Amino acid sequence: MAPSADPVSRIVIENAAIATVDAHDTEYASGHLVVAGNTIESIGAGRAPEDLENVVRRIDGTGHLVTPGLVNTHHHFYQWITRGLATDHNLFDWLVALYPTWARIDEPMVRAAARGSLAMMARGGVTTAMDHHYVYPRGSGDLSGAIIGAARDTGVRFTLARGSMDRSVKDGGLPPDFAVESLDGALAGTEAAIDAHHDASFDSMTQVAVAPCSPFSISTELLRQGAELARRRGVRMHTHGSETVEEEKFCHELFGMGPTDYFESTGWLGDDVWMAHCVHMNDADIAAFARTGTGVAHCPSSNARLAAGIARVPDMLAAGVPVGLGVDGTASNESGELHTELRNALLINRLGAHREKALNARQALRLGTYGGAQVLGRADQIGSLERGKLADLVLWKLDTLAHASIADPVTALVLGAAAPVTLSLVNGKPVVEDNHLITADEDAIARVTRDEARRLAQIAAGA
Ligand SMILES: [Zn+2]
């Protein structure tokens, strides 16, 4: 007789407030959650059953809130080593200022920047990250492999949006000629990343999306053939869209239509697509996103930093558009942590047309969890705390000076200071314990990222 499989080990959390972010926004003032292996086995009010077998940890969550892990839906990891530059620019001026530096990145720099970006997000409660990487200088090494290796080392669930640029200044685009790939090179590199790294399984830790950069840095043909590639391979599609008035003007001048119509004409609306920013959307654009199921990565801090404007998130949600949150690259959002985006999504949208009714704390938490899972195409697996879903969750400590006098835990989490993370689990495994990353040495990462930032600055200065 074959030996039976090892009994699955269990982690029990109890006596904690729980915000499940399920379809009914179910919450427990004091509840329990049982993780079995990499899956949520049970969740509910009161204490966990006493007679569970093979419990390896029983955690008293008194003074804590448990939520789904945060999901980041837009980022550019490499920018971790070019933070704090061109600080008073709009998008196009900022890009033109930074492209020459970015074009000099190499594999050790990208690896260091990815580790820095991932460490910062993970210690702040992110359990699923993504990187939209679109700068692939010739001879710079295996950048996709370096980024994916960094995500694996950090222990977070990850989507690499394999980006590309092939429209340089000589073709009417914004990036300099030396910063772009050829059309064929971009498509081949993207397909190679899918071949090497994409895992479509339920509990996948690594997925790859097709992600040409933006209308002003890519050819129409790259959009068309990129969509064809993504759909042939069954992977998702990501790009930047409708970020600034300058981009809108660019699209009208070059293509005779606005960004959303241009994306639709090239096959880039659909329930397998999510787009960063979507700030300048009229009613017809929002209706097109809703009709096609196209998702949005809302990046309020970056939009403010680059003076892009306020995305119409309440109107998108009312129309049924899936919306998640994004840090965006840390050259336009130096904090690099997603809690800031929960808070700023709420605050900045209240400065828009809907004022105090724009978003509440629970809607902000939903954007940063379930909404993110939706736009990454993983809402069946992560984004809410429900029986059978993957155990990606965060235990936030809310009983210290920063939060203890706020009675409602979700309000404390969203409107208060960034809360310490007592424990985060990804796929049932601890990534943060007692507010420290346990999968990596934060001080060592800080030193290496500082050194690589200096090396890049020196190379760029001598270019
Ligand atoms: Zn971006």
Image (cartoon, rainbow, N blue to C red):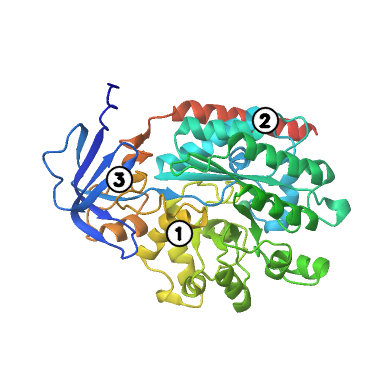
Kindly tell me whether mark 1's CB lies below 8 Å from ligand 1: no
Choose mark 3 or mark 1, whichever is in front.
3
Query: Disc 2 on helix, strand or loop?
Result: loop
Q: Please name the residue that numbered disc 3 is placed on.
A: 40
Residue name at image x 80 percent, y 43 percent:
184
Query: Disc 1 on helix, strand or loop?
Result: helix
Label 1 environment density (alpha carbons within 10 Å; few <14, some 14–19, many ≥20): many
Q: Earlier in the sequence, mark 3 or mark 2?
A: 3
Residue 142: image location, x then y, percent: 67, 30
Q: Please name the residue that numbered disc 1 is placed on.
A: 371
Does any portion of residue 300 appear in the rendered image? yes
406 horizontally vs 262: left or right: left
Q: Are marks 3 and 2 in contact (CB under 8 Å)?
A: no
260 horizontally vs 355: left or right: right
Residue 99 in the image: above or below residue 293 = above
Q: Residue furthest right?
A: 170
Tag 3: amino acid:
Ile
Decide which of 285, 314 is in the foreground and name it: 285
**CA distance for labels 3 and 2:** 36 Å
Label 2 environment density (alpha carbons within 10 Å; few <14, some 14–19, many ≥20): some
Decide which of 378, 394 is in the foreground and name it: 378
**CA distance for labels 2 and 1:** 31 Å
Q: Earlier in the sequence, mark 3 or mark 1?
A: 3
Residue 449 in the image: above or below residue 218 = above
Residue 138: image location, x then y, percent: 78, 34
